[in-house]
Amino acid sequence: MKYQTYSPLKVNDHSYSAISFDKLSEQHDLARLPFCVKILLENLLRHEHTDFVSDTDIETIARWDTSDGDDHEISFVPARVILQDFTGVPAIVDLAAMRDAINRLGGDAQAINPLNPVELVIDHSVMVDHFAEEDALKKNTAIEVERNKERYQFLKWGQSSFDNFKVVPPGRGIVHQVNLEYLARCVFTKEQGDETLVYPDTLVGTDSHTTMINGLGVLGWGVGGIEAEAAMLGQPVTMLLPRVVGFRLTGKLPAGVTATDMVLTITEQLRNHGVVGKFVEFYGPGLSSLTTADRATIANMAPEYGATCGIFPLDDVALDYLRLTGRDEQQIELVEAYAKQTGLWHDDNSKDAEYHETLELDLSEVVPSVAGPKRPQDRIALDNAAAAYNEWLSQQIDVADVTEEADFVAEGGDAPVVDEDHASYVKLDDNAFNLEDGAVVIAAITSCTNTSNPSVLIAAGLVAKKAAELGLTRKPWVKTSLAPGSQVVTQYLEDAGLMPYLEQLGFNLVGYGCTTCIGNSGPLPDAIETAIRKAKLSVTSVLSGNRNFEGRIHPDVAANYLASPPLVVAYALAGNMKMDIANSPIGKDSQGSDVYLKDLWPTPEEVQQYIKDNVSGELFKAKYADVFKGSGVWNDLEVSDTSVYDWPDSTYIEHPPFFETMSTTPDPIGAIKDARCLVKVGDSITTDHISPAGAIAPDSPAGEYLQELGVTPEHFNSYGSRRGNHEVMMRGTFANVRLKNQLAPGTSGSATTHFPSGDAMSIYHAAMRYKEEKVPAIVIGGKEYGTGSSRDWAAKGPSLMGVKAVIAESFERIHRSNLIGMGILPLQFSDGDSAESLGLEGNEQFSIEPVERGQKSTQMTVTKVDGSTLTVDLTVRIDTANEFTYYEHGGILHYVIREYLKA
């Protein structure tokens, strides 16, 4: 080993050993390296003895030539893996199926175990069925457990059967917030011989917002469930040495501006600059004004600005947070000593690193903002939000459609009136009102993005307090909810005396989970849903989340806006996005006087005093003391003690067919001949479009399948909760109600045309017909194909449906990797080419030449209906040698199984 050396490190009475940069420092100025690149370098040095790290890898990083445009592949071994239950269940299902496959092929099933620590937090299953009720939490929790009992039994079996696997039971918090507040180590320790090795805490996670932990100086990012499974099983994550964008922060946020406003501004700026696939590293004098919670808010939304990560350094601010959240003092001192010894520490004397590109933001110029109506990067200054919504609305309304629906009868038996303002009369409980376009029908304080930040939660509580004291109430059509990321949040809100005011405005605690942000908003009241559908109203939601893609929040809500928690409260009071809440009265007080937003907004000093008085390390210690202990319901779940899973008769957990026909050696890669296009779509198709996580429609292929099994619609649960059942997920693939497949013009959702018959049918049924006919399928897309959450089923579903290749103008990083992980070939149109420019209609036959190792381009022959042909040059988006290995094996897990059988 040419470079690997260790240095002793002593902290109090504890002795450690750490990788030293000394040898490399003699030849290279490592102070030039960005913080995140130093972590990658340490990782390579620590694994220098393996066959996946070369001297060239180490030299290339140490040299750090930002003018070098050559791609260089490196390997990265994360210290740990983190999962949430939507993506975690299928990961553990796959591990269980791998044990079966190993068993069938003559190997030792118990050899399949995570080799690195894996922690799963159950946070994606609770839905907002009950809201604005004192016992909403109790009711929603009972429904959650009833809906998900089979999944929870499976996860509990996994916890007892697999080594190095822990589960945080439901009701404890959101995975990223639990990670930030408790699980993160900042530096890791591991016994190696008679020494204790210390090294950076790094991770990958099966949720794209794993990046939130970057705010604490921990390098980690989201990967597909498939890639995460490989990391659990000891496979390195292969990646191209990233381009690093330095984002210099100066100044400090002005009064009245929140961390949410800041992150929406940064998201807009970075998305406009273009950072897809890059690392973003924040530096500059403005860092010192940001708490770790502020930093984590920025880091959380790295997927929204398109970066692999958005990292902050280890510094005194990080140590302050570790103390605030009750971490062990020995660990805190180890973090500081290790970071200083290895050059990973940042302070005012630190030299700025060298970056490939740089941007800058003066925080004092940030203004209150929202983002919407359907993309998180579409920031709107708050004082322009109403005008922007009205402009969007003017493009949506079709008056002719409205008048045709004027004769329907709403819930309660009253005929609605559709007037010139496009409104519908509704009776709901003891209230009667006109529901109008722009009505805020969902106002949700939710998501790890903001509920990890006491400054915006306390601000929301103070807005509620001032509003309630003035006599303001939420509008009756607004579904309000509070779903914080940890139990710590409700405790400090209660200690501060703010919970009663939030509850008075309808923001009762509904659960500890992602809820509205991932589409678990639950149903709207029947009268509201009926009015929206019949009068075709363009209603809105406002949430403190990170995602607002089309169809994600609720199928009946056309426009969705991201906002800070205090603004969520304000919009619940205002009730309509048409209202200019920055300048117009939000409502009237008990004396009939106008109340403005400025009358409700707390000062920074108020917020900080509440935080100082009510948020402490002891509070975090108390709430996390038994984090792995569940409720009585969880603890009472009965599970088998078998090492090979005894697959039950379940509509939630099914034995997946991925390995049923695999042999000990892979088949040669062949050509894709005479394929048919199953789906043809435009730009910005997200994993939400491909693999929805929301409600299952009764008339969808998945809904029909469940009803055939005797599951009634009220017991469907969500797609996300059934990700352990491949039959449901296959049928849910490309079934999002907002998907517009160009092969079925005038439709939305799961609709396509089968060729050459011309028959109209669901995408699932067309895929099954192609499989029966032994015809391979392809998908054609536009720019940014696969953006959004890192859903493994967005690749698994198409794989099971017979899709052999996806051809697009560009890909999102994680989804491209996931496609390869499931044996699907990602191909990219040459620069300037697109389906439109090439005249591809989707009714042609497509043949693609076999791809060989190292091949960067290939050709596709397109045979048109009239028999003429077209040759199209395509770029092969298998970017690394490891990725090609996975592709030639038919998928990453197939490769891992075969490697285990060799051992």
Image: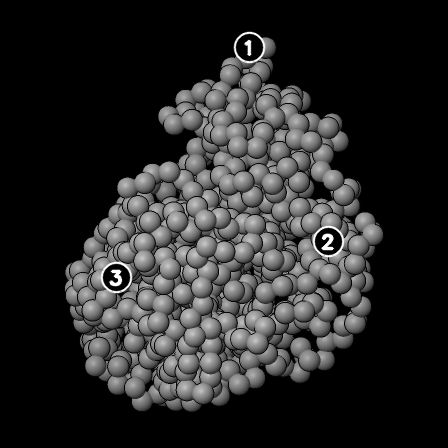
Q: Residue at x 50, y 56 (%)?
A: 1
Q: Is residue 550 visible?
A: no
Q: CA distance from mark 3 to mark 1?
A: 57 Å
Number of residues whose C-alpha sits closer than 10 Å to that of mark 2, classed few (under 14), some (14–19) or many (20 or more): few
**Closer mark to the observer between disc 2 and disc 3:** 2
Number of residues whose C-alpha sits closer than 10 Å to that of mark 1, classed few (under 14), some (14–19) or many (20 or more): few
Q: Is residue 296 left or right of residue 697?
A: left
Foreground pick, 474 / 121: 121
Q: Amino acid at mark 2?
A: Ala
Q: Amino acid at mark 1?
A: Ser
Q: Which residue position holds label 2?
A: 903
Q: Which residue position holds label 1?
A: 868
Q: Earlier in the sequence, mark 2 or mark 3?
A: 3
Q: Which residue position holds label 3?
A: 283
Q: Residue at x 21, y 78 (%)?
A: 603
Q: Is residue 518 left or right of residue 218?
A: right
Query: Percent x, y for residue 128?
Result: 52, 68
Q: Residue at x 62, y 33 (%)?
A: 804
Q: Amino acid at mark 3?
A: Tyr
